[in-house]
Amino acid sequence: MTSSSLKTVASQHNAYFHPPRCPSLGPVIVKPAEPVACSATVTVTEKPQPRQFFIHGITKDGRTFRPSDWAERLAGAMSSFRPGGVQGAPGPALGYSPYCVPRMIGELKCVLVNEALRDIEPMAWDFVMHFARDNELQVEEAPAKPAAPGA
């Protein structure tokens, strides 16, 4: 590199890292440019609602799954997986997680599992779905909730 190119690089470096100074006032403050209006349209897409699945208390060959409290046990095991997690107090863990809730459909025990559980804790999601698979329980997607009026 020649001495003139070194001087050019040095002056660019100093201009970038050291603001110019006014002898009587000190450093010169350079204001950023005003924002420029843009006519581009930005489309915000909402994340799709997580799906929900029913794990039915009946096996693929039609037998009722035992023990009779299996749904409460499974949902109880998942009770700590909730929005915000367990906050250290015993109170939040006393109820079921909104992502894994026991339900009755007629006389049949089921567990309603929300796919959002997968985002919170993938291993918990795998545990629930593998429980259903390993015990040959019937699993079906829950019907989507209709959109709220005016939404």
Image: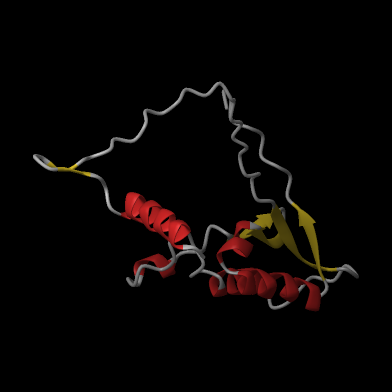
Q: Quadrant of the C terminus?
A: top right
In the foreground, 128 or 95: 128
Q: Is residue 63 visible?
A: yes
Residue at the extreme right of the image, as rendered? 61
Q: Is residue 68 visible?
A: no
Left or right for 40, reference 21:
right
Left or right for 56, reference 32:
right
Residue at the spot x=47%, y=22% of the render? 37
Residue at the extreme left of the image, as rendered? 24
Left or right for 62, reference 8:
right
Rendered position, 114 above or below 29: below
In the foreground, 127 or 137: 127
Rendered position, 106 above or below 65: above
Would you identify the image quadrant in which residue 109 lies? bottom right
Where residue 76 appears, as percent x and y from the top left, is: 54, 72
Where residue 79 appears, as percent x and y from the top left, is: 51, 69
Would you identify the image quadrant in which residue 120 lies? bottom right
Residue at the extreme front of the image, as rendered? 3
Where residue 57 appears, as percent x and y from the top left, is: 75, 67
Rendered position, 90 above or below 142: below
Would you identify the image quadrant in which residue 34 lies? top left
Residue at the spot x=65%, y=68% of the render? 125
In the foreground, 50 or 25: 25
Q: How many circles with numbers are drawn on the protein?
A: 0
Residue at the spot x=12%, y=43% of the render? 23
Colour scheme of the rendered structure: secondary structure
